[in-house]
Amino acid sequence: MEGYEQSLIIEVVPSTGTCILTRGSETLGASVPGNRVVKVSKSKDDIMFNCSAPGYESRTEVLSSSLSPYTVASFFLLDFGIVDATTGAWKKYPERMTVVMQPAPQAPPPPSRRRP
């Protein structure tokens, strides 16, 4: 009833961050500065986010799908969920996610040399 694709909004803090989305061995797209929307096909499989930003530690997040409420209605009212199950539309990901990255630890200053 909702189709087999959906748009995800992936916000990244800091705003200079980039997240590459993959599912299994397939690259789905990227959330980059200026374009935080990624269109994906619906699936029961998790989406991995590999995020990076200059001066920040890399971060990996996982996004899982859940049963779409329209599939439940379809099951009881229309076609017993057969169409949604065959097209992959029976699962849906949360539409918005925010990835907050941690600053990379700074290297300690070099030891000062004292002359005798």
Image: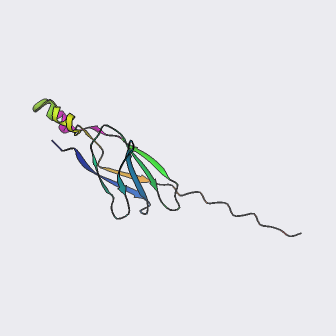
Quadrant in which the N terminus appears: top left
Where's residue 74, x and y in %? Answer: 14, 34
Count the marks.
0
Give the residue drawn at x 61%, y 60%. Answer: 106
Residue 71 as seen in the image, left or right of residue 115 = left
Give the residue drawn at x 53%, y 61%. Answer: 55
Q: Is residue 113 above or below residue 12?
A: below
Q: Is residue 101 above or below residue 2?
A: below
The quadrant holding residue 79 is top left
Any magenta on residue 72? Answer: yes
Give the residue drawn at x 22%, y 44%. Answer: 4
Which residues fall within the magenta stretch? 64-73
Q: Residue furthest bottom?
A: 115
Q: Residue furthest left?
A: 78
Where's residue 112, x and y in %? Answer: 77, 66
Q: Residue furthest right?
A: 116
Quadrant in which the C terminus appears: bottom right
Q: How is the image coloured?
A: rainbow
Residue 3 as seen in the image, left or right of residue 50 = left
- The residue closer to the viewer here, 5 or 68, is 5
Residue 81 as seen in the image, left or right of residue 107 = left
Give the residue drawn at x 83%, y 68%. Answer: 114
Any magenta on residue 44? Answer: no
Q: Is residue 108 above or below residue 93?
A: below
Residue 25 as seen in the image, left or right of residue 71 = right
The quadrant holding residue 15 is bottom left
Where's residue 38, x and y in %? Answer: 31, 54
Where's residue 34, x and y in %? Answer: 34, 65
Q: Residue furthest front?
A: 25
